[in-house]
Amino acid sequence: MNNINFDMMGTGMDFEVGSTSGVVAVVTPAGEVRQVASGLAFPNGMAVTADGSTLVVAESFASRLGAFDIDAQGGLSNRRVWAEVEGGADGICIDAEGAIWCATQQGCARVREGGEMLQRIPVELPAFSCALGGPDGATLYIVANEWKGVENVGKGPRTGRVYTARVEVPRA
């Protein structure tokens, strides 16, 4: 699980864009929790590769996908940049080819490790998350919402939408 590790909705607004206070923790089957990574720039989406060897974390404040090797006890090591993502990095999912779909301010982007942009699906509102699903796993669901800042959460009309798009490569 991840945590931005500050009170984003609090009245003090005690954070700065670019903050690297985020953490990742592992929860064992016995319910024990231990922190396994820190210094993340607003961790806001995670996915594990199909072989279980790598955790990819969307770091929204850094517009990148970070990666860690996962050991047998759930520990993380070998932190690295998996890909830079133009337009931010939010909720993510992995497809059967190991590419990652990442929600961005412009929609969703499909990227390969190293940063090669494979595909973009634009939507009208900033995207916050995405998931591959449907009967054959080849429908990309994109969750989006107008964002007017923390101070306006819960005020005004609700603008949330779920978009769908057919993709060539299904979920992993």
Image (spheres, rainbow, N blue to C red):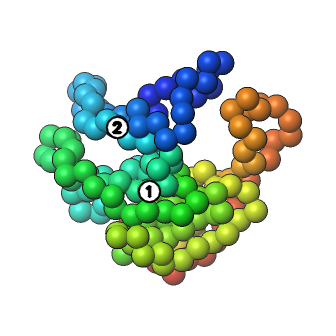
Q: Quadrant of the N terminus?
A: top left
Residue named by callout 1? 64
Residue 51 is situated, as x and y percent measured from the top left of the image, at: 24, 62
Q: Quadrant of residue 95?
A: bottom left
Question: Contact, CB < 8 Å: mark 1 with mark 2?
Answer: no
- Of residues 93 and 28, the one drawn nearer to the viewer in this rendering: 93
Q: Residue at x 29, y 63 (%)?
A: 50
Q: Whole-Å distance between the Cαs marked 1 and 2? A: 14 Å
Residue at the far bottom: name it.
Answer: 168
Specify whether 1 is left or right of 54.
right
Q: Quadrant of residue 36?
A: top left
Residue at x 58%, y 60% (from the top left corner)? 87
Reply above or below: 28 against 99: above
Residue projecting furthest to the right? 157
Spot occupied by residue 160 in the image (x, y as percentages of width and height):
74, 48
The disc labelled 1 sits on which kind of residue?
Answer: Arg
Q: Is residue 50 left or right of residue 15?
A: left
Label 2 sits on residue: 39
